[in-house]
Image: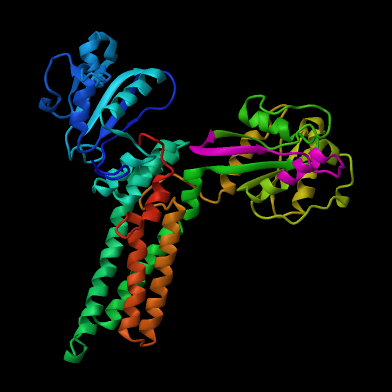
Amino acid sequence: MPAVGTPEDTICAIATPAGEGGIGIVRISGPHAIDIGSRVVRLRSRQPLQTLASHTLHLADILFPPIPSRDGLSISETRESTEQIVDEGLVVYMKAPRSFTAEDVIEIHCHGSVLVLQRVCEACVAAGARLAQAGEFTKRAFLNGRLDLSQAEAVLDTIKAKSALGLKLAQRPLRGELAQQVHQLRTGLVGLLAHLEAGIDFAEEDITFVEREAMIVSLQETLAHIRRMLATAETGRILRDGVRVVIVGEPNVGKSSLLNCLLRENRAIVTDIPGTTRDIIEESVDWFGLRITLVDTAGLRDTTDLVELEGIRRSKEAQHEADIVLNVLDGAQLATIDMGTVRLPSLGDEHVWVVNKIDLVDAASVEPVSDALRARTKCKVLPISVRTGEGLEALKHAIRVQLGKPSFEPRDGVIITHVRHRVALERAETSLQETLVSIERGIEPEFVAVDLRGAADALGEIVGAITSDEILDRVFSEFCIGK
């Protein structure tokens, strides 16, 4: 028998989410899938499992396989056969290579009881399978050439998508769009490298395999393409992971009320007592197809309360991790003081000043107060009322505009969503820059080839053409069991 943990093992796992449901699926994949499936499945038609047409569903009883007793008799010979039945369900045989893993796959569709699914898995293990590791089905699909590495990552992104645009974005590399562009760029670099190395091998023959100017032009075009891809990385991060909007301000300016109003539910406790919120409270909503995580924080003020001090420390930490910071001010209070005495700190472009409680201010005073603030800050200033809802749609629009793009709708062209892809592209960019400098300075072609090969290898890491066990372990460790 092969050692545990090798590709020669036949693996099994529950492929549906934990919890109760009408249907649950146990997946078996590997070279002995048919033999193991035959031990745990008895078709109502009495046909042998291996004779079934691929990708067709058949009604079956799901059994716990016979276990030899001490006297040599199997359980089936010492007990009623009905005691072995775990459940009834449907069985499908997907013959290699026409399956997700490109191996023989048996899927057992049974009732979605946690106990039933666990028992079916136990039956598969008793029949000779081993439990799959996290991401092992997708890893086998990659190792068997069914998916490249970027497509495998897109499978995980599709499973974890939290917004409509995030899902749409994940499905593009799953169709191979990223891989196609990366392969095209890498093929061009490998072709140049082949000509360059041929010139090195035949240096004494005075044969030119590629003109210097033609190589420079080709490398510059590839470099420009890589930079265009890198320019999409921030948009890709937002589409994939969403936007983090942190609400800050002094106590009792309406931060928690704003959170509740934007969420349309009473998520945070609201009282007139200063310092009610002492910890980070966060919830997510879907706005304009994006996942927006709203974070309420402790009020910023001088205090000696140790718990409140810890909350203030976390508030400041949350600001550093934010994509957008909403600084909430009490508009009713501002309307009663000399605006010339108001001093606002110099803040980054990601900050927005939100003037709350304008329902408590004379209508004629709202704009003068807002204008006085605008004269003292480069950040956007928005008057709102969480009590009446006035200005909330304008605030949502401002958050949308603050993200810096007129549209996040994925259109033509690849959008980079993974840090691993961005880092690989940055390495390819650096190697190409060094290659161009070396060519322009007349450096020996052997050194030019080293940089050129580095760029090609960096691109190869994105799709798995160049990889290592460390990269594979890191990628597939994020998957759930059963996928």
Query: Would residue 229 be found to the left or right of residue 204 on screen?
Result: right
Q: Is residue 412 above or below residue 194?
A: above
Q: Residue at x 28, y 10 (%)?
A: 83
Between 61 and 419, the residue placed more toward the observer is: 61
Q: Position of residue 229 (x, y in %)?
A: 41, 58
Picture colour scheme = rainbow
Q: Residue at x 85, y 50 (%)?
A: 342
> Is residue 474 within the magenta segment?
no
Q: Residue at x 36, y 72 (%)?
A: 220
Magenta span of residues: 286-314
Q: Is residue 257 above or below residue 119?
A: below
Q: Position of residue 188 (x, y in %)?
A: 26, 67
Between 42 and 271, the residue placed more toward the observer is: 42
Specify the quadrant of the image occupied by residue 252: top right
Q: Is residue 345 above or below residue 258?
A: below
Query: Would residue 78 be found to the left or right of residue 168 on screen?
Result: left
Res 395 seen here? yes
Res 328 seen here? no
> Is residue 306 within the magenta segment?
yes
Q: Position of residue 415 (x, y in %)?
A: 41, 52
Q: Which image quarter is the C terminus in?
A: top left
Specify the quadrant of the image occupied by residue 353: top right
Query: Would residue 336 be found to the left or right of residue 143 on screen?
Result: right
Q: Is residue 84 above or below residue 53?
A: above
Q: Position of residue 208 (x, y in %)?
A: 20, 85
Q: Residue at x 29, y 50 (%)?
A: 148
